[in-house]
Image (cartoon, helix red, strand yellow):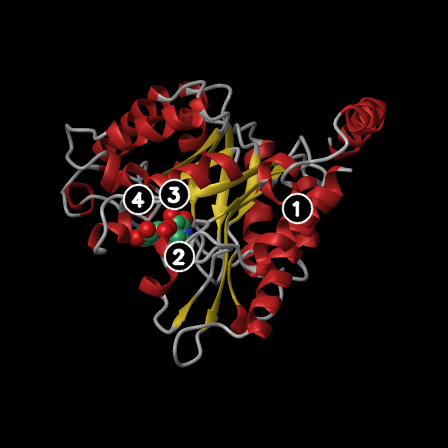
Amino acid sequence: MRTAARAVVAVLATTATLSFVIQPVQAHPHAKSLRSVAPRDLRIGTAVAGGGHHVDQPYPDPFTFDKPYRKVLAREFNSASPENQMKWEFIHPERNRYNFGPADAIVRFARENGQVVRGHTLLWHSQNPAWLTEGTFTKAELRSILKKHIFTVVGRYRGKIQQWDVANEIFNENGEYRQENIFIRELGPGIVADAFRWAHQADPRAQLFLNDYGVEWPGVKVDAYETLAKELLAQRVPLHGFASQAHLSMRYGAPDQLAGVLQRFDDLGLKTAITELDVRMDLPEGGVPTAEQLQTQASYYKTVLDACLAVDDCNSFTIWGFTDKYSWVPVFFPSEGAATVMWDDFSKKPAYYTLRDTLARARR
Ligand code: XIL
């Protein structure tokens, strides 16, 4: 797909030259946003802050109340991922009650601002409501609860979601099915295929993804996903993509083998995506990163973007929040932080400029 885009760009080059002649001086060259410089076949996304850890923080719901935040969200991105607002505990807090308001608001905002939405997530071991995890259900009941949930949530946003993370983090570090996942534990791994089938029935146009962290380097986890993907495809299960979350820490080195990993799934005919990129670091005393740390961080961001750009059908590149103001990192990884591309006041770090330059170069 990227090759085709290049051809289109070549054809459009004449037009571009003309408009340059007509409008030779750009008033604010630095006002260019990530979405505006990105290759046309690549969506640039962010998590939309709200729910989850934000609920315990001393600020009101970011997406609802932070106007400058909403402005940057609209300006920089053409894909939006609800950070928590479509997770079970948030959208389905009681067995017979759904809480669609916050997710609806994001989907509406996305439509108004020319953004696609990545739905997140349907089958996961974490952030499930107590009524589900602590309830006593027969296997048949549990299966029907999952099926109903998928039809209700995916059905509500039918036609409005570009990609769904259907199955999230279903393998542990040893490449085994996670037994913490209530559906996998109680119903067996075959439930994964069912989740994809149900999601496809509920929204035939949505692209359905496997999504996980710790798949940025080759290893048993990636092998497990490759085996599963082959099995699902052989069974004609509607699986369309494989995604790397890419929650990175500078403790573990640069993700320099990511392109190779993505390529293995591209070779199976799947789309690939980066869905939750952030790059955390150990903060020095005082909490302010050094210039060198910021450069290393920028290079990690670039390595991940380059990996996506190198793979034909990697069409979605999402960072897990764009400002440190709302990042989940300091809450979940004490002593680490500064993981996003903007400071608390939305001013830009080197990582932001590196992403933008890399995108602009890829578009040409
Ligand atoms: C995180 C959110 O950012 C937090 O707000 C929440 O408290 C916990 O979950 N993998 C995922 C995401 O798939 O849903 C997680 O998001 C981060 C790890």
Name the residue: 68% across, 60% down.
257
SS for dot 2: loop
Amino acid at circle 2: Asp
Tags 4 and 3 touching, CB below 8 Å? yes
- Image-based side of 44 in relation to 67, left or right: right
Q: Between marks 4 and 3, how big is the CA–CA gap? A: 7 Å
Q: What residue type is disc 1 on?
A: Cys
Mark 2 in CB contact with mark 4 (< 8 angstroms): no
Which amino acid, mark 4?
Answer: Pro
Q: Marks 1/4: CA distance?
A: 29 Å
Please say whether residue 227 is visible from this viewpoint. yes
Task: Identify the secondary structure beneath mark 3.
Answer: helix
Local crowd at mark 1 within 10 Å, few (<14), some, or many (≥20)?
many
Of marks 4 and 3, the one in the foreground: 3
Q: Which is closer to the viewer, label 1 or label 4?
A: 4
Q: CA distance from mark 1 to mark 3?
A: 26 Å
> Which residue carries the number 1 mark?
308
Is the C-beta of the residue carrying label 1 under 8 Å from the nearest atom of ligand 1?
no
Q: Nearer the viewer, mark 2 or mark 4?
A: 2
Q: Which residue is mark 3?
A: 69
Q: Earlier in the sequence, mark 1 or mark 4?
A: 4
Residue at numbered disc 2: 344
Camera-nearest label, 1 or 2: 2
Q: How many marks?
A: 4
Residue occupied by mark 4: 62
Question: Please, what secondary structure does the residue beneath circle 1 have?
Answer: helix
Q: Residue at the location (39% across, 57% down)?
A: 344
From the image, state whether disc 1 or disc 3 is nearer to you.
Answer: 3
As drawn, the label of residue 349 is none
Circle 4 SS class:
helix
Which image quadrant: the C terminus?
A: top right
Q: Quadrant of residue 1?
A: top right
